[in-house]
Amino acid sequence: GTQRQHTAKMGGLLLVDDREEAKRKKKTTELSMRLGVVAQVHGSSAVACGSTFVVCAVRLVTRRSELVQCEVESADASPLQVDAETVRCAILPAIILERLPKVTVSLALVVGASADRGELRCCVVAASLTLADAGVE
């Protein structure tokens, strides 16, 4: 097939945008997911994205001050590149809060060791799957 190339001249430099070549060079990340991995919660999941591993659980509790609560911690106490507020803000638009008038969605995520620093990506996938496992729309 024909490769699509875009060229542009900037300050005497010739820039080539070869998207097909970039796709070939891009390393693929293995992804595995399981639902229902934690007992006695409303929903849970385990997600591995490359070398990042996240276990997430959700409890639907009587309404507290916040509509959605989120806790993120490291499995081995190492520093993380993601915080609970970032995960909460990423997942909040996916929840139809009007369908949960008297409920607080309480998410807890534990992040395993990561060499590739894909914590946010893995946490958002795990939280989304966990909410689906709990039947939250």
Image: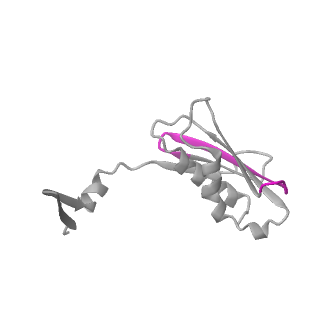
Q: Quadrant of the C terminus?
A: bottom right
**Which residue is outermost to the front?**
11
Residue that sits furthest to the left in the current view: 12
- Vertical placement of residue 70 versus 115, above or below: below
Front in this rendered view, residue 121 or 132: 121
Q: Is residue 34 visible?
A: no
Note whether residue 31 is visible.
yes
Magenta span: helix, strand or loop, mainly? strand
Residue 101 position in % (x across, y down): 83, 66
Quadrant (top left/top right/bottom left/bottom right) for the N terminus: bottom left
Q: Which residues are magenta?
A: 48-66
Q: Is residue 67 left or right of residue 124?
A: right
* Residue lying at 77% horizontally and 45% vertically, measured from the top left: 39
Q: How is the image coloured?
A: one colour
Q: Position of residue 105 (x, y in %)?
A: 76, 56
Outermost residue on the top side: it is 77
Residue 38 sits inside the magenta stretch:
no
In the rendered view, tell whether residue 118 sits above or below residue 134. above
Percent across and percent down for residue 87 are 61, 51
- At a point 60% along the width and 57% down the height, the residue shown is 90
